Amino acid sequence: MIIYTPLPLSDVLAEDNDIEVKYKETTSGTVKLQKNEEGAWIVDRLVSSNPNDFLHDDYQPGTRWKEQ
Amino acid sequence: MNEEQPNQPNQPNQPNQQPSNDDAQGLVQKIRELGETNVPKAGNSDIHVITVIGQIEGHMQLPPQNKTTKYEHIIPQLVAIEQNPNIKGLLLVLNTVGGDVEAGLAIAEMVSTMDKPSVTIILGGGHSIGVPIAAAGNHSFIAETATMTIHPIRFNGMVVGVPQTFEYIEEMQDRIIRFVTSHSDITEDEFKELMFAKGNLQRDIGTNVIGKDAVDHGLINEVGGVGQAIRKLNMLIQQNEGEMLQ
């Protein structure tokens, strides 16, 4: 694999944190969740090509994830 | 509890009734949730948007401090956009620092071979492997302040045969150069000149082109923002539909 980037590869490949991340499939795209200090899953990002999906309250970055 | 819900047939103090009560509650919850999901879908958009941010991730998962755009998320979305008759065009918003060469080229090839019109726009930065992706659309925009870094490929890892590795990297580089020059107005010589220029970048050889410079070099079609990009996309959609009618 060749990474073509202006950033130093040592920064890109550094393993220096342990953020817990998971992806959930929903009816409107894939949601990326991140665990906060209290152990709750927080919405970090929505991956969808439909711009209307981004208006959904449950998928706003920073909201607590409700299991569906 | 009982006083609060006097009309509820299933009371929580009746243990054998509790599961059905929970089921009903769940259903009500779901109806409410579904009711909500319908609200934003009221005005369906015929333009779909894909944002490419951070590192483009391909064969290997990068450590979690990287913001990444994953190959496996983008490719199925592109296929869905291409085959869904309700979607008329694609807007690709780029703010990327590059990433995996193969994944980047795969996305660029997918976008450039789509029948549906596509417009790319660079906001912030479209560096390294972001350059071929920006060139892949039918029309490309760059924000006035956005930059593109064009530099040679670097390699880290074990080198078994020096001439072979050198040739391999050279070939990877040629793939990028060939794609960019065949999908934009820049000539091969000019692109290589930008790629191997000395003294422009602090810790690398290469060039950082900003907004209008990218247009002057022929890498990008126009300087502009989201408004212009959507207007152009709508124009391309109308043209495309006109051609299909004929």
Image (cartoon, coloured by chain):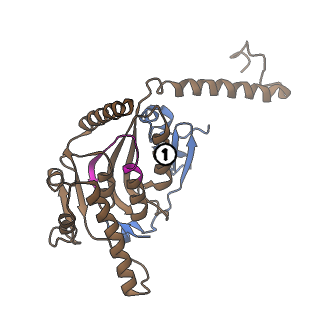
- The residue sitting at 46% across, 31% down in the picture is B86
Quarter containing the C terminus of chain B? top left
Name the quarter where the N terminus of chain B is drawn.
Answer: top right
Residue drawn where x is 25% and y is 34% of the image: B227
Tell me what residue is drawn at x 19 percent, y 45 percent.
B222
Query: Would you say residue B113 sits in the magenta stretch?
Result: yes
- Looking at the colours in the rendered structure, which chain would you say is drawn in brown? B
Say what secondary structure mark 1 lies in. Answer: helix
Residue at (28%, 58%) from the top-left corner? B182
| Residue B223 at x, y percent in the picture | 18, 45
Q: Is residue B9 above or below residue B24?
A: above
Task: Decide if residue A1 is on the left or right side of residue B224.
Answer: right
Seen from this angle, which residue lies furthest front?
B246
Amino acid of disc 1? Val
- Stretch in magenta: B110-127
Q: Which residue is label 1 attached to?
A: B79
Image coordinates for residue B232, horizontal then vertical, percent: 26, 36
Viewer-nearest residue: B242 or A8:
B242
Q: Is residue A8 visible?
A: no
Q: Is residue B143 above or below residue B99?
A: above
Q: Chain under label 1?
A: B
| B5 displayed left or right of B215 | right
Figure quadrant of residue B168: bottom left
* Chain letter, blue: A
Q: Is residue B19 left or right of residue B41?
A: right
Label 1 crowd bin: few (<14), some (14–19), many (20+), radius 10 Å: few
Residue B62 pos. (x, y %)? 46, 63
| Observer able to see residue B62 | yes
Give the image quarter of residue B14: top right
Q: What count of labels does the image hold? A: 1
In the image, B119 versus B41, the foreground residue is B119
Residue A31 vs residue B120: left or right? right
